[in-house]
Amino acid sequence: MNPKECRYTKGHTWVKVENNEATVGITDYAQEQLGSVLFLEVAEVGRPVAQFQPCGTVESDKATSDIMSPVSGQVTTVNEEVLNAPELVNQDPYGASWLFKARLSDPQELNALMTAEEFEAYIAQG
């Protein structure tokens, strides 16, 4: 089940926004499709990210994929714990395995993202 307080992209990232700060991660659906996550790389603190543009890489036993940012802004925090233990993405995709936090540059971009219900309908289409 995808948390209702998050918004989702077709690129299978999620974002949760509190006080103009976005927390970004990889969806449960994506981690299931990827298999065992072996390596993560994300934008560094201070780096700008742009909505629907690559902001990192995820490598698994099945594939290497770009991580697409759900929002535009500037990275304020990186989750070093998940970078050091990428398997957390498989264990807790909406909790301990968040990737980075960013200060939003355009909160209106959230309107371009899917709600949990819309995302579930999207992934159900295959």
Image (spheres, grey):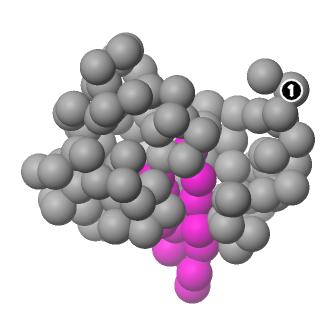
Q: Looking at the picture, how far across and down is residue 80, in whole percent? A: 16, 59
Which residues are the magenta region? 13-25
**Most foreground residue, 22 or 4:** 4
Quadrant location, the C terminus: top right
* Residue visible at 60% across and 40% down in the picture: 29
In the rendered image, residue 22 lying in the magenta stretch gets the answer yes
Which secondary structure, mark 1? loop
Q: Looking at the picture, how far across and down is residue 45, in whole percent? A: 24, 57
Please state which amino acid type lies under the numbered disc 1.
Answer: Gln
Q: Which residue is mark 1?
A: 125
Q: Looking at the picture, how far across and down is residue 98, in whole percent? A: 39, 60
Quadrant location, the N terminus: bottom right
Of all residues, the one furthest to the left in this rendering is 84
Of all residues, the one furthest to the top in this rendering is 63
* Residue visible at 17% across and 61% down in the picture: 81
| Residue 5 as seen in the image, left or right of residue 50 | right
Visible in this render: residue 57? no
- In the image, residue 25 sits, relative to residue 49, either above or below, namely below
* Residue visible at 87% across and 48% down in the picture: 118
